[in-house]
Amino acid sequence: MPLSEALAIARKDVLLLEPDMPLYGRMFGEVLVGLEARCPDVEPDTERTGSYGFGCAYIGIWGLDRLYGDDAHVVRALSNAVSQFDARIGVGENKWLAYVAASASSSGRGLKITGEPGRFLMKLPVELLPVDFNLTTRLHEFGLHTMGDIAALPPGAMQAQFGNDGTLMSDLSNGIDHRPLVARRTEEAVSEYLEFPDATVSMAAILPAIESLLSRAYAHPQLARRYAREAKLEATVLRRPPWTMRVAFKDPAGSRTKALFSIKAKLHDLALPGPIEDIRLTLSGLTGEAGRQESLWMEVRRDQKLQEAVNQLEVRLGTTPPVYQVRELEPWSRIPERRHALVQLSP
Amino acid sequence: MVPNSGTKARASAIKPLNAPTQVTVNADERGMPSSVSIGGKVNEVVAVEDMWKINDEWWRGPDKEIERVYFHTRLSDGRPVTLFHDLAVDSWFRQ
């Protein structure tokens, strides 16, 4: 149900809470780390839950029986890893079956699909299929209410009617899913957190705080004699959604001063959405290399960068920026002021 | 014939470089600079390291003729300064 519709029905006594995506990301990251401590192949479900991939993860449990015993013991071990939440765990031959099993299981429990998957799926509603809401509505219009209804149709008919989505729905309703499990690549990062005594918008307070966070981060053993390629700033904003900013360092930053310089430059033109209550700094892309690969076509790249800078200045100033270059006019002239001139830059 | 593009002339798009600025110079009886006033301060010329003369565009008439005597000088504070005496208007310039 759209939010506007829900608000119209509720009319009053509604408290709207802004989603705290950075917090959810951190919490789910902790869950994934806990799962990875028990099983190395963990893939957050970014397809289903949007690019954030919060709340759902696939785990490859092949071979874990030697470590934990049968599947029931594996489920218990995974459930213990997510002790702060009531996890639903599904065990299946592929990602789709595991997802459906987890959806059908109860909180803190596991469910395993055994035998013919079609029999398990046949009574489940089509709303579980990972397709657009409008497509599900059309399925109902065609009298297809369960996966069993879809599985009873030939795949060709589904494809003819719904195209690629039809093939997908037909395959999934028959328990067929060829998507491989792609374990996430864990990224090394150093994170530091600071809380302000009072919410502030003043850069005079925020910049020293960032400097302090950078000092703490670079003092971390993980960053000893190493460089960071990216910094992420997250802040809780008073009565507003959280604020996030990413700064990609042109050259990997190996010191507080260098990182602060880039962050300051980005913060300079930025207006904060409101007073911030705390701030978290995360340095990632850690590397032992400080070098930067130079372009083969330096001249071309330089002109492009120059043109980009001029365009940005033009937008900011609202007029042609006073950027000039020295051009030869009459270099042979005996009169010095006629030899060269400043002309409007046009890279 | 090339049609008129309609674009306004943009004189501001070209700025002269190394344009001469008028200065006050005290010259001796031989016409050599002995002191120059720059920024309200009088600086003594301690040496004339080079000197040359240009005479150009005389064919455009006496009003537009360019006739300058250049002096590459060194001031008392060590700065090198190039001055010229414009003979056409009898004025001194720094360049």
Image (spheres, coloured by chain):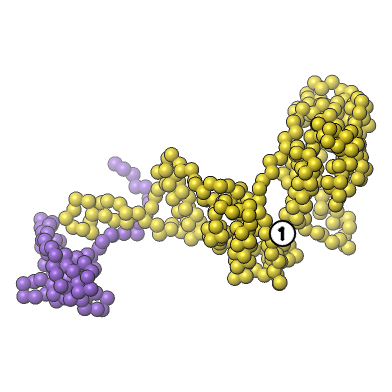
Chain colours: A yellow, B purple
Which chain contains the residue that carries disc 1? A
The amino acid sitting under disc 1 is Pro
Decide: is A345 above or below B40: above
Left or right, A162 with respect to B88, comes to right
Residue A334: x and y in percent read 16, 55
x 75%, y 49%: residue: A29
Tell which of A347 and A91 is nearer to you. Answer: A91
x 15%, y 72%: residue: B46
Residue A270 appearing in the image? no
x 17%, y 70%: residue: B92
Left or right, A244 with respect to A123, comes to left
Residue A110: x and y in percent read 90, 39
Residue A172: x and y in percent read 83, 29
Tell which of A270 and B74 is nearer to you. Answer: B74
> Element type at marker 1?
loop
Left or right, A317 with respect to A66, comes to left
Q: Which image quadrant is residue A273 in?
A: bottom right
Decide: is A326 above or below A274: above
Left or right, A127 with respect to B71, comes to right
Residue labelled with disc 1: A242
Residue A309 appearing in the image? yes
Crowd around label 1: few <14 · some 14–19 · many ≥20 (10 Å): many
Q: Which image quadrant is residue B60 in?
A: bottom left
Residue A275: x and y in percent read 69, 67
